[in-house]
Amino acid sequence: MKTTIYYFTGTVNSLAAAKKIAALLGDCELVPIASLKNKRGDITPTADRVGIICPVYDAGLPRIVADCSGRLNLSRAGYTFAIVTLGRIGVSALHQMNGILFNKQSKRLDAAFAVPMPGNFPPVGKIASVEKQETILKAADARLTEIAGLIDLGIAVPPGFSLVSALMKCITYGSVSRNGHGMYTQFSVSDTCTSCGTCAKVCPVGNITLVNKQPSWQHH
Ligand SMILES: Cc1cc2nc3c(=O)[nH]c(=O)nc-3n(C[C@H](O)[C@H](O)[C@H](O)COP(=O)(O)O)c2cc1C
């Protein structure tokens, strides 16, 4: 069965998850959501199975993913799933995606999963030690194998519910996410920067350019 997975990743957790699921399902096309940003109109995948894999931001979906989900026409898909990777709290992102899909085409996800992975946002959580990250990644790997099995069998899995996540989304998502695009003004470069340019090369939304050999953040 052919599968298309749309993914977004900031620091590669969700890309690793997407690659693992794709390898286990087979016959799978991986489409970066960032590549759809400048294309207009509906996105209509022709695969029988369609998935979306992305991180949780502020207990909700990254804005680029929310926008893309709103343009997805899933009329040809027999089975749809979403996987969010997250530090700890954020199952509400899956409810947000269900809401977006339902508003567009009266269709909900057939299966929705949240997979804890190392947190990547120092303002809200200490970055785990390498040992702790290895433990988290091992558990994530096992969970992704289990999830691929459920997807392969076409099992229905509704998103779980977490009151903490729902409350956190109410408090943080609107204000924080709306203002998130201004946060780059607070980024700075220390003199340990080697001007290698990797940040500019890997940024999924082309938000970094090198000016005088130093990263300069744009407002994407
Ligand atoms: C701006 C921002 C907001 C985040 N908000 C949450 C959150 O609300 N809950 C959570 O559990 N993790 C949160 N995280 C952590 C990421 O969801 C998590 O590390 C994810 O696996 C990163 O995936 P990626 O490497 O594919 O970008 C946040 C990360 C960022 C950058």
Image (cartoon, grey):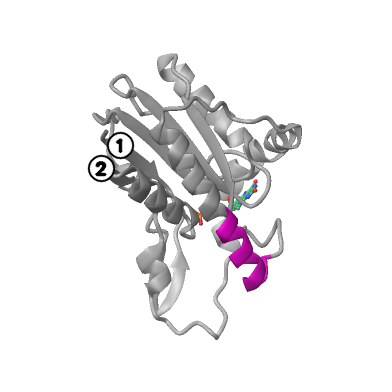
- Image location (x, y in percent) of residue 98: 52, 25
Q: Residue at x 75, y 37 (%)?
A: 164
Q: Nearer the viewer, residue 194 or 219?
A: 194
Within-10-Å neighbours for mark 2: few <14, some 14–19, many 20+: few
Tag 2's secondary structure?
loop
- Image location (x, y in percent) of residue 129: 67, 71
Residue holding disc 1? 3
CB under 8 Å between discs 2 and 1: yes
Q: Residue at x 45, y 23 (%)?
A: 101
Q: Residue at x 55, y 85 (%)?
A: 191
Tag 1's secondary structure?
strand
Return the mark for residue 27: 2
In the shown orientation, is residue 136 left or right of residue 35?
Answer: right
Mark 2 CB within 8 Å of ligand 1: no
In the rendered structure, which amino acid carries the disc numbered 2? Asp
Q: N-terminal of the two: label 2 or label 1? A: 1
Within-10-Å neighbours for mark 1: few <14, some 14–19, many 20+: many
Q: Nearer the viewer, residue 160 or 55?
A: 160
Q: Main secondary structure of the magenta part?
A: helix
Check if residue 205 falls in the magenta segment: no
Please identify the residue farthest to the top as the structure is shown: 106
Q: Answer yes or no: is residue 118 visible.
A: no
- Image location (x, y in percent) of residue 125: 71, 59
- Image location (x, y in percent) of residue 112: 52, 32
* Residue 176 position by quadrant: top right
Quadrant including the N terminus: top left
Check if residue 132 falls in the magenta segment: yes
In the shown orientation, is residue 4 left or right of residue 189?
Answer: left
Magenta span covers which residues?
Answer: 127-139
Residue 170, compared with residue 181, is above or below; it is: above
Residue 208, compared with residue 42, is above or below; it is: below
